Image (cartoon, rainbow, N blue to C red):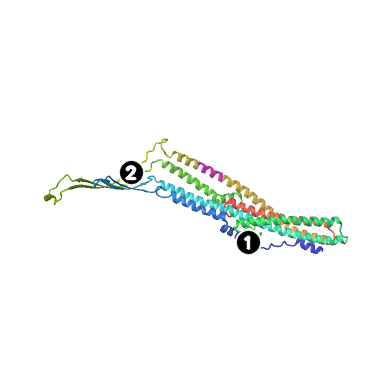
Amino acid sequence: MRRLLFIFLFMSTPCLLAQERLTLSKAIDEARQNNPDLKAKKYSIGLAEADQKRFGSFFLSNPEFEYESRSDRRYANQGEGGQSFSLSQEVEILGQQFLRRSIWSDRVDRTDAEINAFENDFVAEVKTSFAQLFAAQEGVAIGNAIVELNRQLAEGAERRFNAGDISQLDYNLILVERDRSIADQYGVESQLKSARAEFNRLLGRNADSSTEAVLDTTQPFQEYTLQQLTTVALEQRSDLKAHQLEESATGTNTTLSWMNLIPTPKFSIVLEKETSAFDRSNFTGNPSVVNGIDRLDDTDKLLNFRIGVSVPIVIPFLFGSNQADIQQAQVENRIANEALVSKRNTIAAELYSAFNRYQSARQSIALYQGINPRLDVNVALLTKGYQGGQIDLSALLVQKDRIFRTRLAYVDALLEYTAARAELERAVGGKLP
């Protein structure tokens, strides 16, 4: 009985059976491919490119074509009439179109940087969720071992109680321990279902998909300096690049607003055709001179071609003179400047916090790695002491609880380390050096 008891107490916790086992790298690849939030964010680059096409064309407005037909020969066979064709186009003469192209090129790049920043945060979220699922799986496995052990203890205690080998108090303690472990297991299994549902959501799967996280716990723990990571973060953080591009775009837009104070001329080309006919029936011709024509009609035709230009008159504070646009552009540029400063400060704070969290988690997991071998030694000593009658049942239960709690604490420390590393990667904007 004692030997069987320790087999259940100190055996390696079994892996959970699942339909599919996923490593972290495979999970990230699947999430990048299938997550609808990330896919929707990537589509936003199309909106920025559409705005670039809309506002980045050489001519800001479409050309205007005008046709006119006129005649006063409605009730008689004489009079004047004509047709005119005109084509006009506003032309920016100070190169505003090149500034607009620069603005929207920056904003397309800004949108791309925002997508990369979103993806970086998303990958960190997947890594954290993966670690939470792994920890929940380990918690269930350890909990199952605890429940099975307590059931074996209860069965053995019942036989020993009926035989009079143990007291009513010892028997009751074992029953309470058994029932408490079963109740705790319900909560642990619920946490596993919640962790799996959240992980499946990030992967674009159904919430109830059976998925098992397989975490490699053999990777060496790396050491970094805050200065080293700060340099990497300033180079890699896509959200910082997005703010820099927005500052550039708003600065160019301010220049464009000042240039728009200069009126934009409209050039036009006009083609006119006029015809006039008058009845001269009161004039009688000489047939010998005019070949028998006894009536004269006077018909004139005129073809006119001209080029014109019109320029708006700018009167500040009376007509629209772009003053409001200039003020708006200046304010937007100031906002972008302050937002860039704020983003740099935010990155520094995030990096400092993530670095300290990683350092603490790394030290904690290193301690637990040193504790685990001592647990194995304690197992051997407890086994020998219990089998030799040197340790009673109550002491065994206390030591059992400590050992299982220590193993659960190691799982929590592993979760914290994985989450802290993911947070540090998010803070530096990508992979760690």
Task: Answer yes or no: is residue 432 visible.
Answer: no
| Earlier sequence position, callout 2 versus callout 1 | 1
**SS assignment at label 1:** strand
Q: Which residue is drawn at 86% across and 56% down?
A: 168
Quadrant where the N terminus lies? bottom right
- Displayed quadrant of residue 142: bottom right
Q: Position of residue 277 (x, y in %)?
A: 22, 46
Query: What is the number of the mark on residue 309?
Result: 2
Observer-nearest residue: 194 or 166? 194
Q: Is residue 261 left or right of residue 303?
A: right
Mark 2 vs 1: CB contact within 8 A: no
Magenta span of residues: 333-343
Q: Is residue 57 left or right of residue 298?
A: right
Q: Where is residue 162 in the image (x, y as percent from the top left)?
A: 87, 61
Task: Answer yes or no: is residue 32 visible.
Answer: yes
Q: Position of residue 407 (x, y in %)?
A: 73, 57
Prevailing SS of the magenta stretch: helix
Q: Where is residue 379 in the image (x, y as percent from the top left)?
A: 77, 60
Observer-nearest residue: 152 or 403? 152
Amino acid type for the residue under numbered disc 2:
Val
